Amino acid sequence: MGIGNKLSELLKERNMTVTELSRRINVAPTTVYSIIQRNNKKVDIDVLLDIADVLGVTAEYFRDSPKSEPHTRAAHFDGTEYTEEQLDRIEAFAKFIKQEDK
């Protein structure tokens, strides 16, 4: 579902007109109508953020679907900021957190 469809649904749910939304985000009503009618997949980020703010959603709401790409977090310690004992405790805590989710 594109941004336009989601925007149209939100406007209906919020009982808000295109004119009112456009006034509140300081753009021409034709801009909002264009987003809805074309069911755009991409919209100017500033406009999208303003729309999301006024309608009480996050910009993420307008994404087609959440990306499920894996991501990696890593931490690097060069060995000087923590003692060996502290590093052992950090590692133990990480294992504890992993076990907590099982």
Image (tube, rainbow, N blue to C red):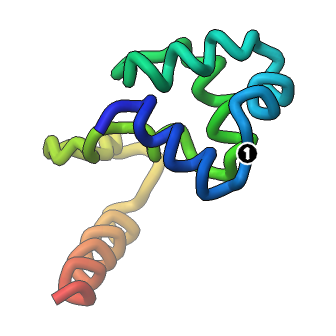
Disc 1 residue type (three-letter): Met
Q: From the viewer's perspective, is residue 87 above or below residue 9?
A: below
Q: Nearer the viewer, residue 46 or 10?
A: 10
Which residue lies at the image location 29% right of the left edge and 39% below the top edge? Answer: 1
Residue 75, percent from left and from top: 32, 46
Which residue lies at the image location 61% right of the left edge and 20% below the top edge? Answer: 32
Residue 90, percent from left and from top: 34, 69
| Mark 1 neighbour class, 10 Å CA radius: few under 14, some 14 to 19, many 20 or more | few
Q: Nearer the viewer, residue 10 or 71?
A: 10
Residue 10, percent from left and from top: 57, 49
Q: From the viewer's perspective, is residue 45 above or below residue 70?
A: above
Does residue 3 appear to the left or right of 19 in the view shown? left
Which quadrant: the C terminus? bottom left
Image quarter of residue 41: top left
Does residue 40 appear to the left or right of 66 in the view shown? right
Q: Nearer the viewer, residue 62 or 67?
A: 62
Q: From the viewer's perspective, is residue 97 above or below residue 27?
A: below
Residue 55, percent from left and from top: 68, 46
Which residue lies at the image location 73% right of the left edge and 38% below the top edge? Answer: 17
Image quarter of residue 78: top left
The residue beneath circle 1 is: 16
Secondary structure beneath dot 1 equals loop
Which residue lies at the image location 22% right of the left edge and 42% below the top edge? Answer: 67
Does residue 51 appear to the left or right of 87 in the view shown? right
Does residue 56 appear to the left or right of 86 in the view shown? right
How many numbered callouts? 1
